Amino acid sequence: MDTKYIFFTGGVVSSVGKGVTAAAIGRLLKERGFAVAVQKLDPYINVDPGTMSPYQHGEVYVLDDGSETDLDLGHYERFIDVSLNRVCNVTTGQVYAEVISKERRGDYLGGTIQVIPHITNEIKRRIGLVAKTTGAEIVLVEIGGTVGDIESLPFLEALRQMRSDLGRDRTLNIHVTWLPYIGATDELKTKPTQHSVRELRSIGISPDVIIARSDHPVEDDLREKMALFCDVERRAVIPLVTASVLYEVPLMLERFGLAEFLLERLKLEPRRSPDWRDWERLVAEVQRPKPKVSVALVGKYVELHDAYFSVREAIEHAALALGLEVEINWVHSSELEKDRGWEVVRNADGILVPGGFGSRGIEGKIKAIHYARENKVPYLGLCLGMQLMVVEFARHLLGSDEPNSTEFDRSTSHPVIDLMPDQRSIADMGGTMRLGLYPCQLQPGSRAAQAYGVPQVQERHRHRFELNNAYRDLLGKGGMVFSGISPDGRLVEIAELADHPFMVATQFHPEFLSRPNRPHPLFLGFLDAVRHRSCQAIEAVVAEEVLH
Ligand code: GLN
């Protein structure tokens, strides 16, 4: 079958959930038996988001092959349950780097290199690689940003050309817009959508579908109006009201018959009928009242919850599977250093320290870990959260504040966490960490092995530093169990404490492999311990009341 393409552009404002919409539409198609992949085209000049601050960009999502990508790739993988690869996230930086290196090699034989056709050809080549490398029959391509941005013009031009190259049966344009609400008159406005469609038309792209995002219900007459003014079929104007549960989005789009419309336009017959039972169960489970537990998430970028998107999702997946409602309480680690915010940590049934870089707030995280260890509060550490658990334990064993990671103290006399040997000679920051999927052998009988229930696993990594093997003996004798080791025995991948209900931490990022219907075993193990602690706390309160 010739590959079919669905292009997603955004209008009016950014952050309207274009990524989730594309992911949900991917699911609609997968449910009908098609192999689907999604690609994100990001108009910024960085080669990848790996070097960007989470404040700029949100989380950096890591794929199996070690590419550092936009967090939308996380939506795609979670909604569609596919494993994507590095061609699925293209940036302007990558496109120009490729074209310029070809020019330096002399590949263009004396030609003048221009945005059209050289840059647009490179964009089209990269779009073509998705089907070749993933086997997808339908490729969804999302353009970052909003129509009208200078940066995205070459991408839009490439899409315009692809429609004339491939024809209308193989390409489809979906424009995702926003309907602002005017409180004074209690109405939703379609004018920005009309303008945005006009802008899109002026660069030669006509939308086949408009997805109108809104915080308020959209009446039929508004759909009618948008269809008329934007020259789109009425059934192809789909209102999408902000969902309280992310996983409801595919179900909402399904109700509007969007999949039938897309397949009809792409001249495809569904191969099977969709089965939404799992998704309906998931949404019902979110809405059902459940026992509440709380987890303190001690991080550095806590003002921006997007910086920990996959961690939040992984907690949610595991919570739903266990029939719990988890309240995540965000704690700024540098506040803990100033003796603020401790009540949140003290009231939590579990503590989680996620990944991170740089020295700000490190001591606050170590204090929170100290608290978790001493008070036997369930703890899950992810990447930096493992490294700091090791630092805290070494400080405890040696009775000194000296142990540290050389990331934060280059001259520490106890470098319990140190640069990996193959990292020492690296000068470039971009794309040079230990990245992507690596195998990990589990120690039988450990908490990690119990949680996974298999002898070996593969997990996604993104780090430069690691546990210094010179300290394995000391830590091991003190009660730390190295429950996950690389098969060659060189790298500690999981550490846990024997004398603690659940104090487990990983050098890798388990959150990237959690899926709505396949929660991650370590998050399940953690929340199970959290639930246990919360029940004990309730029993203690009840016992206290009975006594008095
Ligand atoms: N900064 C640490 C390292 O580079 C941890 C990285 C992370 O948490 N992703 O090893």
Image (cartoon, rainbow, N blue to C red):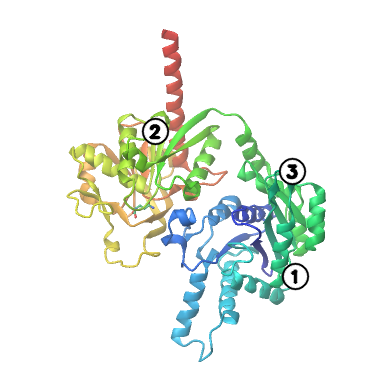
Secondary element under disc 1, as helix, strand or loop, is loop
Separation of disc 3 and disc 2 at Cα? Answer: 42 Å
Secondary element under disc 2, as helix, strand or loop, is helix
The residue pinned by badge 2 equals 345
Mark closer to the chain start, 3 or 1 = 1
Q: Amino acid at mark 3?
A: Asp
Separation of disc 3 and disc 1 at Cα? Answer: 39 Å
Q: Residue at x 81, y 55 (%)?
A: 225
Point out which mark residue 38 bears: none
Q: Amino acid at mark 2?
A: Val
Q: Nearer the viewer, residue 15 or 434?
A: 15
Q: Residue 529: x percent and y percent?
A: 43, 31
Asked if marks 3 and 1 touch (Cβ < 8 Å), the reply is no
Q: Residue at x 33, y 57 (%)?
A: 464
Q: Residue 288: x percent and y percent?
A: 62, 31
Q: Residues within 10 Å of mark 3 (few under 14, many from 20)?
A: few
Q: Is residue 456 above or below residue 336?
A: below
Q: Residues within 10 Å of mark 2 (few under 14, many from 20)?
A: many
Nearer the viewer's eye, disc 2 or disc 1?
2
Q: Is residue 323 left or right of residue 336?
A: right
The residue pinned by badge 3 equals 186
Q: Quadrant of residue 386?
A: top left
Q: Nearer the viewer, residue 2 or 105?
A: 105
Q: Residue at x 27, y 40 (%)?
A: 392
Secondary element under disc 3, as helix, strand or loop, is loop
Q: Residues within 10 Å of mark 1 (few under 14, many from 20)?
A: some
Q: Is mark 3 within 8 Å of ligand 1?
A: no
The residue pinned by badge 1 equals 168
